[in-house]
Amino acid sequence: MTRATDHAYSEIRSLILSGDAPPGSALKEEQLAEICGVSRTPVRDALRRLEAELYVVRSESQRTFVANWSRADVEEMFALRAMLEAHAARRAAERMTGDMLREMRACNEAIELAVGLAQPDVHEFLDRNRDFHAMIVAAADSPRLAATLSTLVEQPIVRRTALHYRRDQLAQSANEHRELLQAFAAGDPDWAHAVMTSHIRRAFHAFSNTQSDGDREKR
């Protein structure tokens, strides 16, 4: 894969993850080429890669759109992530160093500060939340696990859900992170596995409730 294709892939994926290209929106090669500063060929190659990773879908007329996942799709994504991230937490508890713990504690303190503002900074919460989970995967020290997790399309869903979170829901996420840190400090893989499983399952039900509220508002 060429450097131009890698660049186009990174740029288009960022548009999707940030929500700038929302689910269901059309992706036009000419516009993407202009945004990415490359020709249409790298964009086309990048879109094929994103299609294989389920970020985008192609219609019968060969038009490309940002994937708009069904509830069943989302439930499966969360179920897979719960299994994989819980496994990552178990491995991390067995490999966690003092420096890693200090870095993760600082990250969660930043999350708590963002949540504690008069108007919670949800974007800061999302960025630091992503960092926190990435640190766990790094501590797990499994390239195979990291590669598998990177193919799960959850970040746009997390972002969409968090934007509707109440303060207490944001705080609950930080509290669960704090319990994960306690499990890591104790070197208890079973505890870490259990906390991460419930953390991801709670996030799924928060997403489901958000979707249900949105459906009621449309009626």
Image (spheres, rainbow, N blue to C red):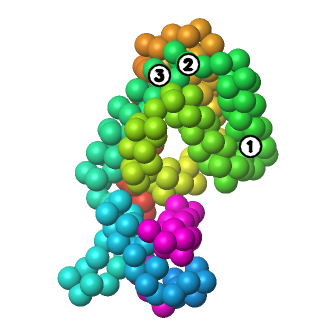
Mark 2 and mark 3 in contact (Cβ < 8 Å)? Answer: yes
Residue shown at 32%/84% (left/top)? 63
Q: Which quadrant would the C terminus be assigned to in this image?
A: bottom left
The dot on residue 91 is 3
Q: Is residue 12 magenta?
A: yes
Which residue is the site of mark 2?
Answer: 95
Residue shown at 52%/23% (left/top)? 92
Residue shown at 78%/43% (left/top)? 117
> Callout 1: 10 Å neighbours few (<14), some, many (20+)?
many
Please state which of the two labelled residues, at mark 1 or mark 3, is closer to the viewer: 3
Per the picture, the main secondary structure of the magenta-coloured stretch is helix
- Amino acid type at circle 2 is Arg
Quadrant of res 38: bottom right
Secondary-structure class at tag 2: helix
Residues rendered magenta in the picture = 1-30
Residue shown at 51%/68% (left/top)? 6
Asked if 59 appears above or below 127 in the picture, the reply is below
